[in-house]
Image: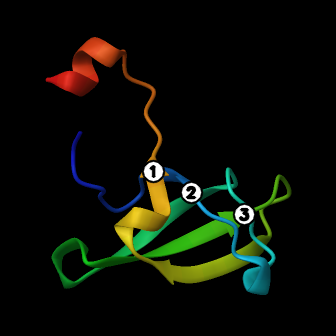
Amino acid sequence: MRNPKQYDSVALLEDLPEENLWRGQVGVLVEVYNEGEAFEVEFIDTSGQTYGLLTLRPKQFMVLSRESSDRIAA
């Protein structure tokens, strides 16, 4: 598995009720802090409006991929 990088699509791995965000919601990494210790993640609805923008640790999300599993393992 590769390290997360700016503009990756990610999915939440935990509920964040105080932010009105729930496990499985998809966002985009818009900023990388301290060489990957934390990431600013933006959540946007289908009309392009931001409904969430917060800093997350890598353990709180998974990077989504459109590559085949053969390419991911490499």
User: Which dot, 3 or 2, sits closer to the camera?
Assistant: 2
Provide the residue designation for mark 3: 44
Callout 3 environment at 10 Å: few (<14), some (14 to 19), or many (20+)?
some
Query: In the image, is residue 41 above or below residue 44?
Result: below
Q: Are marks 1 and 3 in contact (CB under 8 Å)?
A: no
Provide the residue designation for mark 2: 13
User: Mark on residue 62?
Assistant: 1
What's the amino acid at mark 3? Answer: Ile
Q: Is residue 68 left or right of residue 52?
A: left
User: Which dot, 1 or 2, sits closer to the camera?
Assistant: 2
| Quadrant into which the N terminus falls | top left
Q: CA distance from mark 3 to mark 2?
A: 17 Å
**Residue at point 70%, 77% (across, down):** 52
**Residue at point 52%, 71% (across, down):** 41
What's the amino acid at mark 2? Answer: Leu
**Residue at point 45%, 70% (across, down):** 30
Q: Is residue 15 left or right of residue 9?
A: right
Q: CA distance from mark 1 to mark 3?
A: 17 Å
Q: Are marks 1 and 2 in contact (CB under 8 Å)?
A: yes
